[in-house]
Image (cartoon, rainbow, N blue to C red):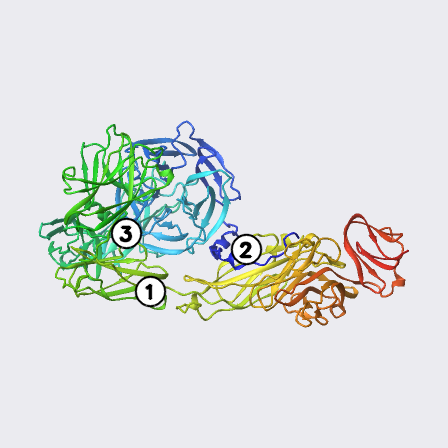
Amino acid sequence: MKRFLLFITAMVLGMLHPLTTSAARSAANPQKAEAQAPSFYAVTAAPTVGISKFTADSDPLSLTEVFSDNEIGYITERVVAAYGNGKLFFYQPRINNYNEVWKLRFVSYKLDGDTWSFDNAVELAPSYYFPHFLNYDPQTSTLYGLKNTMNGCEVYVVDQQTGDQTLVRTLPSLYNMVVTDAYGVTYATDYDGMLYNINLATGETKQIGATGIYSDDIMVGIVDPVTGRLYQNLSKSGNYTLYELSKTTGEATKVGAFPAGTNVRGLAPVAATTPGVTQQAPDACTDINVEYDVPGATSAIIRATAPTMSFDKVTPLTGKVSVKFYVDEEEAPFRTVDNVSAGQTVNVGYEFNTSGIHKIKVVAANSVGEGPARTISTYAGYDTPKAPNNISLSIAADGNYNLTWEAPTEGINGGAVNKNQLTYVITQYPEGKEVGQTKKLAFNGTVTSHSFSDYYFGVKAVVNGKTGEEGLSNHATHGDFADIPYYDDFSNTDTHGTYTIVNTRDDATWEFKNSNIGGMAAIYDGSQCNNVADDYLILPPMNISKGTEYTITFKVASAFNQDYGNNLDLLLVKSNTDPANGKTKIGSFDNIPDYTEGLSEKTFTYTATEDGTAFFAFFCRSAAKRKVTLYDIQILGSNFENAPADVENLEAVAGEMGEHTVAISFVAPTKDAKGNALTDNLTIKVFRDNEKTPVKTFTSIQPGESCNFTDNTVGAGRHTYTVITVNKKGASEGAYTTAFVGQGVPSAPTNFKITEDDDAFILSWTEPTTSSDGHYIDFSKLTYAIYYQYGLMENPQLLDGEVSGSELRVPKAMFDDYASAHQILITFIIMAQTEGGISPIQMNDVLYGKAYTLPFNESFEGGFTSTEPWGIVEVSEKYVSCWTMITGTSSKKPMDVYPQDDDNGMAMFYQNSEDAYEARLISPQVDITGVNNPYLSFYVYHYNSASATDNTIQIELQYDKTYDYVAIGEPINVFGESGWEEHRIDFSNAKDKKFRVAFHATADKQAPIFIDNMTVDGGTETAISSLSDSDSSVKTLDGAILINADNAKYSVCNAAGATVAAGTVTGQKAVRLAPGLYIVHVAGKTVKCTVK
């Protein structure tokens, strides 16, 4: 073994980050499917471009191409296809070298029997605003497009002929797969691998459970129409693997990996039939609807039209059918209407027993069997209102505003709304504060803040305790000026309306949009313009003070491969409508580097020469066909003399029991920085940590007014809150306070032990009951991360990152492949964990594998060990790392000592930091079963400068499947006449046992201990006279013996039983000896020799 030590330092463990979950591990052990495996079509962009067929029954999966797209060329690595009603739909963007969409198509392919062909392609206006993926609902024949944005997942209804999109709602969370089964039930996964049920019509979500797999990519999924089983294609690092997801628990089970290099862009079913339906049974009923007696009633008439065709859609339906009506999850129909003719409409009455969403399922049946079910949802009783319509806002110069709207006409679930009882709640944005309620269709008020803001209002209807959707008005700006300090990264679209864009030539100009680099930005895109740029992006008005220095910082980049010709000026202008008149240049940035070199940050300063309102502006003067992207504008002022004083009585109180909230409270100042009384209203901004955007802004605050709010978006850890007060004369320096949020860091688990049975190692520990930092911990939710390391592993491997309780069984089988050829020392590491962090580590190790038989020898040749595994156990509390292997010429030696057996290697215990220290050097396991007279022989270097009492070696044994150390014999004192001396320890008490030998060293500071040439051996016979003195493996020479063996260990003992030579022989080895009687152990044989 060339690497001596398996001990894991705390520094290495500091880089560990437990991620694997129990669910992910179970996914690696799939259960065999009982039902016949389904077959699917896979849309592939590599290595073949087209559509292939496969059966979900092997790992890896086996694909057969059935359609090549090489000639048509619409299938690329950027498409994500969805199947519906015999067609595959997808959007195909084409991206140029500047990462811009220069072409966009909506494409469909169709399936006729088992033959695929091109269907349709529609050219759309090039844009990034197309769905990230699609989903088809077979119940409603609706094609949905889904696009993840900063505001959530936008859901669009997509026209299946034109690709036109209509936004229907925005889901609050982001998803990377959405699929709907034959009965209209929709399943979705998020980027953390959680499976949900989603109602795309209402936005309602229900969590099912963790899949155990996750990806940052969009993933395609499918529900097999025959078996109803849900599948997801995991995309990770360019590899694709098919998993089956449990509809009840979410757990993922691996089906098989797609062949290496396969790029899967969509899935479609091969068998698109409904389970249990024969071809001559009736087709599905149509025109299913529910008509309530009056709006808001729970009694209704349910109608359905019988089919005119058989399920095969070829044979006209003859004879009479029965139409069965089901409600919700009832197994039996509540009404069956017999003797219904093909195409006949059937009406039945029904009284729903509760208000809310109900499912109506209708099935037609004849003598052959039942046809496919069709299900619709309906809402009985009064529904939660949708958002009001046509909300209109206007703000007068004095701040008085007028808000009007139209009442909602239906509920969010398509039900009726009690229009006569509606109350409207009005919320003012961007502050997000409720400003009033009314039963009318209009509301008036006043915005009183001096801050220049882009205002808009939300209106939502409330009735019978149900709060409806909020509708938003148009935007309107008002206010004197924007506050300094000022920051905008453009991510909040509410700020976009506060800017003024002046397009001098009415050609290319500034706009706000998502950039190629990432995130929202202000972009001048003149890439298609032949004119030199001359356009202004003007910030909102700001009140500047004479003599104050303002620092303006921003980030900017050019388009790809445009590292020259992009030029930008920073200006101060007096008018946002005529910026060229009276402008002052603050600074210029010419030849802006392209974005491949990263964003360039630029800082300019400006000292105001007069008081008043002015506008900072960016003037783009780039060459023709250039593009500039602007990010992160920040403006700071340095003069606080005339600004308000800081707030008083500032407090930040974290939520109890680890809750992720912080309650902030303070009192607005009553004086300015000079002590003068404040009279005007104030704006107060609360910032968290180093964030440049406030978590809360208070407007129209009177001096001395008490303010409070709760930060509900804060994460775990210690946070600093800075509160800045602003008025027309400037901003305060800032008051700050801190709060610790969430749970603390646990103390380390204790009593970490390893026991074992025939099948497993059993790890056990005592759970901590305190935190290491004094903060709250919910110990009922404490988990543990456990790692292991053995052999030549460079770093510990995660065994389980989410262990609960105080015990874990670890199957021995997971180590069998390595242990079958090597005896291994497995080190287990445990740490307790909360959201606050991980505890200090605890470690223990266990030996596994076949023990060494006699003779066992280790001479540390060349400063390494030839047997494995050796280990170190620290006895003292500190980790000093005293035991090491060294060569005879090593510079680490504190004294001039050379190996006892001249093989340039020995073991040394040495430390120079502690007054006294103890540690064990532990051998591999040795088996002395059936051996008589077992013993240990090893050499110690003695020297007379050592302490006469304090520097010792104690031999200890650690027996098989135990973890205690048993002292054998007395401690050996290092003090003595300088030189190597052999020490022989009788192991008779350990006869017929397996054990590890521990060299327990105790030494003072700077007092080394050297050992070398250790052997465990014994005799199988009691009398030397009974040994053979003739064997082909050993020959006696003059003054030596010649040993013949193939890679075998040997040892030579004198008549007194002391080992005089040992090692490994490959071929032949001559061992020089003084005349006398010797016993040679080699290759399982024991031979007596007499050397002359």
Q: Name the foreground residue: 984 vs 359.
A: 984
Residue 34 placed where, x, y %?
Answer: 51, 50
Disc 1: CA contacts within 10 A as few (<14), some (14-19) or many (>=20): some
Q: Name the foreground residue: 773 vs 46.
A: 773
Disc 2: CA contacts within 10 A as few (<14), some (14-19) or many (>=20): some
Identified by mark 2, the residue type is Pro
Q: CA distance from mark 1 to mark 2?
A: 35 Å
Which residue is label 1 attached to? 739
Q: Looking at the image, is mark 3 or mark 2 nearer the viewer?
A: 2
* Position of 458 relative to 572 (above/below): below
Can residue 161 be seen at all in this image of the molecule? no
Q: Earlier in the sequence, mark 1 or mark 3?
A: 3
- Which secondary structure lies at badge 3? loop
x 46%, y 55%: residue: 19
Which residue is label 2 attached to? 796
Q: Earlier in the sequence, mark 1 or mark 2?
A: 1
Q: CA distance from mark 3 to mark 2?
A: 48 Å
Can residue 123 be seen at all in this image of the molecule? yes
Q: Looking at the image, is mark 1 or mark 3 nearer the viewer?
A: 1
Which residue is label 3 attached to? 202
Identified by mark 3, the residue type is Thr
Q: Earlier in the sequence, mark 3 or mark 2?
A: 3
